[in-house]
Every structure is written in C-alpha cells, then in structure tokens.
Image (cartoon, grey):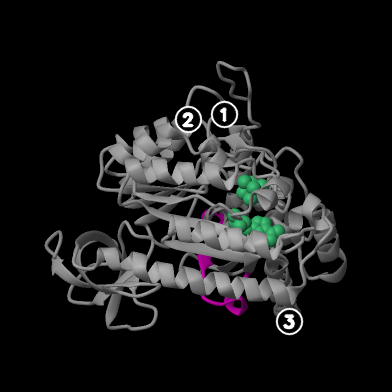
Amino acid sequence: MTTNEHNIAPPYVEQAEIRRQCSLCDAIEQKLFSMGFSEANRPGYFIQTFGCQQNEADSERMAGLAWRMGYRPVATPAAAQLILVNTCAIREHAEKKALSIIGTYKHIKEASAHVIIGVGGCMVTQKHRADQLKNSYPYVDFAFDTGALHLLPELIYHAMTGGRRQFVSSDTYAVAEGLPSHREKPFKAWLSIMYGCNNFCSYCIVPYVRGRERSRRPEAILEEARRLIAEGAKDITLLGQNVNSYGKDIGSVDIASLMRQICALPGDFRLRFMTSHPKDASDALIAAMAEEEKIVPHFHLPVQSGSDEVLRRMNRRYSAEQYLCIIEKLRRSVPDVSITSDIIVGFPGETQADFQATLDLIKAVRYDAIFSFIYSPRKGTPAAAMDGQIPKEISSQRFQRLLSLQQEISRERNQRFVGRTVRALCEEVSKTDPGKMTARGDSPRPIHFADTGARIGEYCDLKIVSADTFSLYGELQEKKNGA
Ligand code: 5AD
Ligand code: SF4
C-alpha cells in the first residue's frame, strides 16, 4: 500500500497479486499447449468493446493479458477460443447492443463448448444486469466488474479447468499497476491517469459503476509514458472521467503539473487529455496548454445544457455564464484552440425555453464539434426518478435541431484551417476511399489526403485545401523521415 504526505491511499493492488495473476497466465498457456495449440498455432481471442475511451483502454489491458496467456487476436468471434465483451452502461442503447451481441454468442458456445466467454465493464457492475447475465445467458462463463479487470487470468483459468461460473464484483475498485497492455496502433496510446468519478451528475451512472476518484501515482504514469514513447507512441491521450481533478485524492500533484512533466520527456509526441469538468477547469491547465508545444490545443469541455435551471437539476455546479467565462479565458490564452462538448437533450423537465438556452449557448461558444445525446434514464440515478420525463418525439425533434445548428457551425469553424499547412500524424488508410490516407492534426477533425507516400504512424505536413462539416481535405507537402 502506497501512501503520500496526506496519508490518503487509493487502494492499489499489491504487486504480489499481479505476479500471482501472471503465473496463472503461464499456467493457462501450458494448458492451451496441452490442448493441442502451439507456438505456430495459437488460440484466438476476440474482444468486443462498447463505450468510451476508458473502456478502450481497459480492453487494451484485457488484450495485453490475453497475449500474455498465449492467445492471439482473430477477426471474428467465431474464430476465437476466448471471447470477451467490455460493456458500457452510459445509455440504455449501449446496454441493449451489448446484450444483443452476447445473445449471438450462444451458437458459438453450442458449436464448441471449449470456447470461453467473459463479460466485463460498466454494464455488469450493476447488480440487476449481473443477475440478468447469470440467469438468462447460461453460456457466459464469467462476468467481472470494472474493479476486477486484473483478475481476468484467474477467471479464465477457473473456466478452463471446469470451475463453476463466476460473477465477480469488487467493492474496492482497486488501481492495478503493472498490467500488460496490447495496442492495435503502436503510435497511438491511451494513458489512464485516474479512475472513477465523484461528481454524481444526477443523470449519470458512472460514479456507481466506476467508483470514487482514484489517481494513479505520478511516478507510475511517467514511467508508463516513457515506455509508450520508447515503443513509438506519438499521440498520447491522458484518460479519466474527470482529469481536471487528477491528484486531489493523493495530494502533491495536479493535472497541469503532471502534463508539464510528461511534456518534458524527450520524444516527438503530442499530448491530449479527456474528459474535463468545467467546475475544475483550472487556470494552471489553460496556462499549460498555452505554453507547452506538445499539448494539443483541443479542450473537450462538456457543458451538457445551456439552461441554468437544467444545470442545477443535473447537479453540474456551474451556470451558463460561468461556463462562458471559462471559454473566454481559454480563447484569450489559446486563441486557436478547438473546443468540443457533450450535450444532453430531453433532460427531465427541460422546457422549450431551456432548450433554446442550449441553442443560444452553442451559438455563443461556436464549438468545433459536439457529441449530443438524448437523455436516457439510468436505474438508480436521481434524474431517473424526476418528474417531467420528456416524450421521445420531443427529445428527437430537439436533437435534430441541435444537430443541424451544430453542423452549420462546424462547417464554418473548419474553414479556418483552409490554406494552412499543418503537421499531422498519418493514422490509417481512409475507411471510405482506399486511395486516400487519414491523418490527425490539432483539429479534432480527420484530414483526408491522396496517398502519395505518407507512412502510417509518421508525421506529415499537409496543406489544407478544403473542409466540410466532418472532415478536412489536404495535400501532402513533404515526405518525412526519408519516406
Ligand atoms: N443519458 C444521456 N446521455 C448521458 N451522458 C451521461 N449519462 C447520460 C444519460 N443518462 C452523456 C453526457 C456525458 C457523456 C459521456 O455521455 O453528455 O458527458
Ligand atoms: Fe458522469 Fe458527471 Fe462524472 Fe462525467 S462528471 S462521469 S457526467 S458523473
């Protein structure tokens, strides 16, 4: 157990436990080999991920453990000996999708009883969903909540050796250091700096399924950042439900100083962070963004609503005016900053005037992009029990109005890049046009350009020639690194 000057200790998992899990990985590999698999013929794993970047980062740890056990990734669940589903609970739609996918795995298990199926993540951290899995999905071998990810080897070993089905719920929400991780793109990395949330926004399930805020120790984060950079990471995103309150539970360090320490590490990389809560968006963080070249000038600062009354009932603890002050400060310090937001429409009791206040705020801020959601009642949250639940037709109409207003603003905002030459990281062959590549620069929008020799995973200079609502279009200016 590690403590600090305030003698507050997040529940770090002891290294001895991680070593125990690692020796189970070895035992699993042995077992797989005894079943006929070999170095040349590895068993396959398939991980289906729902939800946010935090879940993607968790899935990378599940993948890291699966590699450690001797599994290798396969493209379809039907080709896998190990299937893991990492679920999300943020809206009902995400839960329904996960349950329906899990339903399709029944046939796989019927065809091959040796296939192991495990379900993790936020959905199964809710008791009613864990019970549902237990009772209605008998082919699921085990479920593990968000605090029990490090126990995956034990659960798999147990399932392999004919143990009973297991449904693990951890009430400690421990921070496990030293788990292996496997990233699909070595140049792009998620780096979790903290877990959980203390804010209890009245609509949100996260504090109930990811526990209270626990910060990782800065030394562990810096060590991981160093390793990621050495492995070729060029785009690192610091992750947490509310990264602005990083360090408050352990004292001695805050998000701004942590980011500055990471920026001081040698290497050609850029640093992003998400998500931020406006009540904690500090001047020190804005100053770090203004001064540190490696920090991408993009601030994702979810406002949720433009109505003070709705914000109050959401328990957001700021007013629209206070939010606009932060935006003004941000733009003054970082004039070219890209700003994005999350918006919920149809929160209980939202009147037409409340909704108009949201539209007005969006016009005032002129976001680069927003992620908008129709309010979804979550069992156990205060908002689910509030009067004035909004009928779906009204929420959908408001949602459409919001989208079309934002699309107009995004199209206009994106024009500011036209004519500039920007440095961008070439990420992949375009999903829609195989003759094109897709890169990402400082703007949250992807840049598409004709493939004339840029290399995936390397920086290139692109002259932006046009922009529409969702994308920028560029021309490659020069080849980097002798490509
Ligand atoms: N319904 C709709 N959207 C929600 N979000 C969180 N909880 C809900 C809910 N119950 C949205 C918020 C948050 C984003 C990640 O998801 O906008 O910022
Ligand atoms: Fe949910 Fe609010 Fe925490 Fe974000 S800050 S995870 S919306 S409770």
Does 474 lie within the magenta span? no
Residue 433: where, in percent of width, then height?
Answer: 34, 83
Label 3 lies in ligand 1 vicinity (Cβ under 8 Å): no
Residue 53: where, in percent of width, then height?
Answer: 53, 56
95 left or right, relative to 334: right
Alpha carbon separation for disc pair 2 and 1: 7 Å
Residue 362: where, in percent of width, then height?
Answer: 50, 60
Alpha carbon separation for disc pair 2 and 3: 49 Å
**Residue in the foreground of this view, choosing between 241 and 288:** 288
**Residue 239 seen in the figure:** no
Q: Say if 157 sits above or below 85 in the image.
A: above
Using the rendered view, name the quadrant where residue 106 is placed.
bottom right
- The disc at residue 248 is 1
- The disc at residue 254 is 2
Split into 4 quadrants, where in the image is the C terminus? bottom left
- The disc at residue 4 is none
Please tell me whether mark 2 sits on a helix, a strand or a loop: loop
Q: Residue at x 41, y 61 (%)?
A: 368
Alpha carbon separation for disc pair 3 and 1: 48 Å
- Asked whether the beta carbons under mark 2 and mark 1 sit within 8 Å of each other, the answer is yes
Q: Residues within 10 Å of mark 3 (few under 14, many from 20)?
A: few
**Residue in the foreground of this view, choosing between 320 and 334:** 320
Q: Say if 7 sits above or below 362 in the image.
A: above
**Residue 214 seen in the figure:** yes
Give the residue number, with chain letter if any, for mark 3. 107
Q: What stretch of residues is rendered in magenta?
A: 62-81
